[in-house]
Image: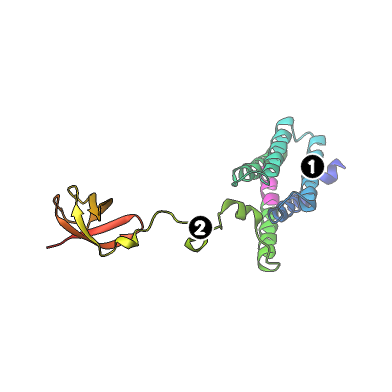
Amino acid sequence: MVAFLTDPIVITVLLTIAGIGIVMELFSPKFGIPGSIGVVALLLFFYGHYLAGLAGIGAFALFVAGIILIFLEFFLPGAIAGTLGVAALIFSLFLAGGNALQMSVSILIALFFSILSFFIMIRIFDKKLVLFNKMVLFDSARKEDGYVSNINRTDLLGMEGTALTILRPAGTAIFNNERVDVVSEGGFIDQNIKIKVIKVEGARIVVREIN
């Protein structure tokens, strides 16, 4: 059993199964069968290397921590837990493996098939990446739905008033006995000068001096 589980070909197969299982779980809202199969493959990998005396407690503890972080990724926002979990898994594989070069080759092959399965899920099966959806906000606050970022004072457009304070270029003006924060077109406007609203951009009201 030890000789079989530590064979380079078997190691590559187990890591490939684990990688594909993790990739499949990225498209699932909850931890399911693919992830379970991937975890079992990793457990067999560590079990064989533990019996062979290659994997210590530290490597296995790091492996368990990686699994827990990946599992928490399905319940926590963002991708920090999942990223740390994958990094912990890969590092634990190197700690458990007796030959760093052999482990590198096996991990690269597993990554190749994992990435291939990732593109197959997206391109052929048109699956949506649940992890990516958790990272990106797709909802939009549209004006048609009643969301406004600020008050749009388009009613002031073209209105004439008086600069209540000096505009350099920002200041306060008065229109029909209403105090409004305005900004000049770029130049300096003195106090009590007649002004006119020439542009309204949300809460930004641009005025120009009336000659």
Is residue 73 visible to us here?
Answer: yes
Residue at the limit of the structure toward the right, as seen here: 1
Disc 2 crowd rating (10 Å Cα; few below 14, some 14-19, many 20+) is few
User: Along the line of sight, which residue is nearer the eye, 198 or 28?
Assistant: 198
Q: CA distance from mark 1 to mark 2?
A: 46 Å
User: The C terminus lies in which quarter of the figure?
Assistant: bottom left
Task: Please say if 60 is above or below 18.
Answer: above
Residue identifier under label 1: 43
Q: Which mark is residue 97?
A: none
**In the image as oriented, which residue stretches furthest toward the left?**
211
Tally of numbered tags: 2
Find the residue positioned furthest to the top: 57
Residue 103 lies left or right of residue 3; in this view the side is: left
Q: Which residue corresponds to the image point at 61% horizontal and 45% vertical from the top-left?
A: 77
Which residues fall within the magenta stretch? 100-107
Q: Amino acid at mark 1?
A: Leu
Classify residue 33 as left or right of residue 91. Answer: right
Marks 1/2 in contact by CB < 8 Å: the verdict is no
Q: Amino acid at mark 2?
A: Ala
Specify whether 33 is left or right of 65. Answer: right
Q: Report whether residue 6 is seen.
A: no
Residue 170's place in the image compared with 143, above or below, is above
Q: Quadrant of the N terminus?
A: top right
Q: Nearer the viewer, residue 165 or 58?
A: 165
Q: Main secondary structure of the magenta part?
A: helix
Give coordinates of residue 158: x percent, y percent. 25, 65
Which x, y percent locates residue 198? 25, 63
Q: Earlier in the sequence, mark 1 or mark 2?
A: 1
Per the image, the residue denoted by label 2 is 141
